[in-house]
Amino acid sequence: MALLSKKDANLILDPLADNNPITIQVLGICSALAITAELKASLVMSISVIFVMGVGNVVISLMRNLIPSKIRIIAQLIVVATLVIVVDQVLKAFAYELSKTLSVFVGLIITNCIIMGRFEAFALGNGVWRSFLDGIGNALGYGVILVMVGFFRELLGAGTLFGIPVLGDPITKTGLYAIGYENNGFMIIPPAALIVVGIIIWVQRSRNKALIEEA
Amino acid sequence: MAINTDKNGYTILFSVLMVIVVGSILAFLASGLSDRIKENERFEKQQNILYAMGVHENTPDSGVNFIPTDVVEEKFEENITEQYVLIDGEIKKDDNAFSLDVKKEIAAFKKGEEAKLPIFVGKKDGENVYVLPMYGKGLWDAIWGFISVDKNMVVQGVYFDHKGETAGLGANIKLRFFMDDFIGESLLDGGSYAGITVSKTNNDPVNEDKQDNEVDAIAGSTITGNGVTAMIKETLKAYKPYLETIRTN
C-alpha cells in the first residue's frame, strides 16, 4: 500500500507545479517580492510558512463545523495570528539567533493571502488529514518559488549564495569580476522579483500549454 | 446533534470562547517563556558589547562570530571592568548601567530630559577601551549598536544591528565588510568630534585612509547609511562631556 492514495498525493504535488499558488494563482506575491533578496531569508520564510500553514489548516479543519460563517474570516485570522505569535515566542526562547533573522517576516506571514486562501477554500470544507496535506503542499509550492527567486536575485545581485561569495570578490576583482563582470544592483530591489517571477511563469506555461488561460 | 451556527447567540458565545482560549494560551506561553527570552536578550547585549570592543571569535574570512552564549557571561565580567552612567554631564559609577534601556535613555536625552547614558569600560591589551551604546533610525525602523574608542578617539570596533532594514541592502550594516571598515578610523577632525560619515563618494573603497572620517557606503542603502552617520554624530554629541575627560586625562 502506498503511503498516500493518489488523490491525497495530488494535494501535495499539484501546488508544486500545475496549481502553484504563486505562479498559477498569483497569490502571495507581496511577500515573494519583499523577502527574496537573499536565499537565506527565502528559505527561512518558506519553512515558517510550511509550519503555520500545516498546523493552521489542521486547526481550521478541526473547527470547521463550529465556526459561525458570519465571523469565519476573523476566526481564521485569529488562528493565523496566534500560531505566528507562538512560533515567534518559542523561537525567541529556544532559537534566538533564528528568531532575529525571522523577526521581520513573522508579521508578513499573518498577511500572507495564500494561508487565508487555503483556510477559506479548503480547510473549511475538508477533513483534517486532507487539510494538512493541502496546507503542506501549498506552502511547499510557495517555498519552491521563493527559493528559486531568492537564488537568482542573490546570485545576480550580490554574487553570493547564503551570504557566501561564489563569483569572486567585486572589490579586489577576483573570479568572474576579473574579466569585467559586475553585480546587477537592480536584482536586489523588489521590482526584480516581479521580473524573475514573470520569467518563471513564462517558462512554466511554455512547457505546459494547458496552463495558458483563454484570452 | 448539529449546531445552528448562524444564530447570533452562538456567534457571540463562539467569539467569547475563542478570545478566552486564545488569550489564555498566549498569556500562559508568554509568562512561561519570558525568563528564557530575557536571558537571551541579556546574552545578546553582552555579545554585542564585547564584539564592539573587539572580543569575538572572528577569523580573517569568517562572518560575525560572537563569543558563544554559554561563556559570554564570564567573558563579559572579565573584559568589562567598570560601568558608568553620564547624567547631565556628570560621570557616576553605576554597576547597573548594563540594564538601562538605551532606547529610552537616548530618547529622553534628545528631549532634553534627565537621562542616564551608560558607558562600559573594558581593558584590551592593557589599554582602556570605552564602549558607548548608540540608537538611531534607518530607512524603515530603528537601528542601534555599540562603538568602542580608545583614549585617542580611535575606533576599536563597532557593532550595528537593525530592526527591519532592507534584506541584501541596508540590512548589511551588520555584516563584517561594513563594520570592519570603522576599525582604526578616528572620530576627531582636528579638535572637533566629526564622527564617521558613511560616504558614497569617498573614493576609498578598500578603506586605506583612516583619517578621512569616512567609510565606504553600501550601494543601494543610502538612507540606512545616512542613519548610521547621524547615529554616530548623535552619540558623540551626547557623550562629549565624557569623551573630553578621557581624552584630556
Image: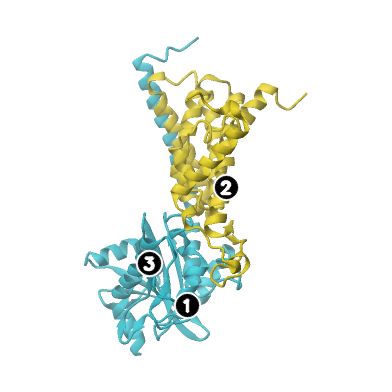
Chain colours: A yellow, B cyan
Q: Which residue is mark 3?
A: B228
Mark identifier at residue B207: 1
Label placed on residue A43: 2
Chain containing the residue with disc 2? A
Q: CA distance from mark 1 to mark 3?
A: 17 Å
Location of residue A47 by image quarter: top right
Which of B210/A101 is in front? B210
**Tag 1 secondary structure:** loop
| In this rendering, the label closer to the viewer, 1 or 2 | 1
Chain identifier of the residue bearing label 1 in the image: B
* Side of B91 where A143 appears, left or right: right
* Side of B164 where B89 appears, left or right: left
Q: Residue at x 69, y 23 (%)?
A: A6
**Amino acid under label 2?**
Leu
Label 3 secondary element: helix
Vertical placement of residue B52 versus A42, above or below: below
Residue under the image location 61 percent in, 33 percent down: A17
Q: Residues within 10 Å of mark 1 (few under 14, many from 20)?
A: some
**Residue furthest toward the top?**
B1
Q: Quadrant of the C terminus of chain B?
A: bottom left
Q: Amino acid at mark 1?
A: Asn
Tell me the residue at 58%/45% (across/down): A148
